[in-house]
Amino acid sequence: MRTSQYLLATIKESPADAEIISHKLMIRAGMVRKLASGLYNWLPLGLRVLNNITKIVREEMNKSGAMEVSMPIVQHAELWHETGRWDQMGPELLRFKDRHNRDFCLGPNHEEVITDLVRNEYASYKQLPATFYQIQTKFRDERRPRFGVMRAREFIMKDAYSFHDSEACLKGTYERMHRTYCSIFDRLDLNYRSVIADSGNIGGSTSHEFHVLANSGEDDIVFSSEGDYAASIDLATGGLAFENQIEKENTPKEVDTGNATSVQEIADILEIQTRKIVKTLIVHAEDEGGNVTDGLVAFFLRGDQELNVIKAQNIAGVFSPLKFASDELIRNKINSHVGYLGPVKLSIRKIADYSVKDLCNFTCGANKPGKHLTNMNWSKACSYDEIVDIRRVQQKDISPKKNGSLLIKKGIEVGHIFQLGHKYSQALNATVLDENGKAVQMLMGCYGIGVTRLVAACIEQNHDEKGIIWPENIAPFQLLIIEIDAHKSTQVTECSNSIYKRYSKLGVDILLDDRDKKTSPGVKFADSELIGIPHRLVISPRSLENGAVEYTCRNGRKKQQINIKEIEIFLNDLLLAC
Ligand code: ATP
Ligand code: MG
């Protein structure tokens, strides 16, 4: 491609709404343009990168034995009624009616559609296992679309679904898909981690997320300084960095704490450490149908620890999503107030975290205005009903395998795999006949990769202050040839054209910057750093006079003069050697 005939839409300034580097660089390099909130046009340069990533994803999925299909983005409501998700999904599911007043939605994923397809096409266990995938547009009406294509409303996902007649078979495919994902992210040169994860509202039990490590990531991921333990913050477990010490029990005392309500304020007034305080949080219970009730549940945590909302809302009988009780409800139901809540004489369900289990001589709210109790110990009057891990692990906690300590880093979720089990096949009655001729529901797995998000994630890990530094296998072009002062010497154009033609024919993707003198060399160089093509040749009258052209590698920016007579050997080595 020649820049004179190409939409090289680079711009100097970042848009005001771009917070993270990949968003800024994708706009500045002319890869994407915003159409509306969470909706993007992909320009030619951006689409080349997206297509390169898609190609790698497709190749690895095909290698895994999965079959590519394409399902409509528009889905009719009946299937979603069958699984109950029409009512369960919030406004993220974009719903609309057709001209016959029938309900439809835009697919945020395709579990319903694929399960319907497979229940109609498959009849016998002998046809299993089967895995299908597509690389296709998804729509989720995200509450806060942001960070460009990282959290868009319309985005491209590679979604795959597997069908099985046994747990062992599902596990086998799940593990193969895990390996496939590793191959994909390895080929993309990403620094990533796979972590055990919560399966959220998709359902099922086992699940792993794949995170690209980057400070701009929205998720906290946890791993051990030693060993291979890695988990999303939602599921991570670990031992306390400061364990509770066994002490001789002192005599309890009620103390005045005035208007102080927060753990830190109480610790300051009483001159104690926050880890000697038990804090109490009150949330709503749920009924057997999963509906919110005015029943209350108390959580007890050590003062220096935080509640893990996901762990807490996953407890049976606790309403999910977690809903904290209002001050009014607390007053009416248990005659206390936020700020001096405590376990004493509390007659609701009481769930303690392990962090308070062996805590001695602690301080807690007295359930009386402006009062706390010190030197408390667990007893009949000050008790809990259950001990559950509801704690958000902290940096430096002890790894659950006791080898090493926990590190918390920021990650961008680029992939997520689930063992769904019977969730969708049961709801949609997707069966095959087993070896005895009996209809059995299939087991399912599902596997997603955020393909458009991957483009942004790659940039987060590959850039410098001047722009993007593309890894070779996803770069929009492999070679950039810049012509300088071509109007002063026909040799410049002759030389660049000859290289351009020769290597284009050999299948190398080349961008030839043949913009005329209206575009200064400075602008050409700045653009080249911004768009990040791995290899650059600069051809100018001056260099040709010396019988050379200048080569620069974008990664490292080392400059080299290449003798014009040796250019072919040099480029063959650089671009054609596999
Ligand atoms: P997130 O936690 O980031 O909202 P998710 O858990 O809802 O993602 P999945 O349902 O697991 O996402 O979808 C599979 C993959 O699709 C994710 O791992 C992510 O890479 C990508 N993805 C999800 N939502 C978006 C979005 N709004 N924009 C771009 N990519 C997305
Ligand atoms: Mg996910």
Image (cartoon, helix red, strand yellow):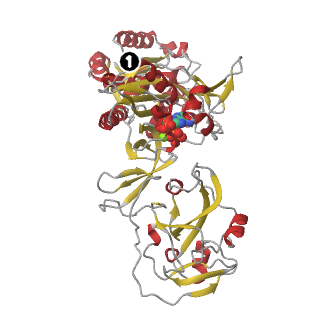
Residue identified by numbered label 1: 545
Q: Amino acid at mark 1?
A: Glu
Disc 1 secondary structure class: helix
Decide which of 125, 58 is in the foreground and name it: 125
In this rendering, the answer to whether 234 lies above or below 415 is below
* In the rendered image, the vertical position of residue 76 relative to residue 405, given as above or below: above
**Can the viewer see residue 418?**
no
Q: How far across and how far down the image is residue 259, in percent?
A: 70, 77
The answer to whether mark 1 is within 8 Å of ligand 1 is: no
Q: Position of residue 265 (x, y in %)?
A: 62, 75
Count numbered badges in the picture: 1
Which residue: 60% across, 58% down?
A: 285
* Most foreground residue, 247 or 544: 247
Q: Nearer the viewer, residue 63 or 355?
A: 355
Q: Quadrant of the C terminus?
A: top left
Specify whether residue 401 is in view.
Answer: yes
For this view, does 285 lie left or right of residue 225?
A: right
Q: Quadrant of residue 313?
A: bottom right
Rendering coords of residue 435 (x, y %):
29, 26
Residue 302 shown left or right of residue 74 in the figure? left
Badge 1: few (under 14), some or many (20 or more) residues near its Cα, within 10 Å? few
Q: Residue at x 50, y 69 (%)?
A: 385
- As drawn, the residue found furthest toward the bottom would be 251
Q: Position of residue 496 (x, y in %)?
A: 41, 14
| Quarter occupied by residue 554 | top left
Q: Is residue 556 above or below residue 480?
A: below
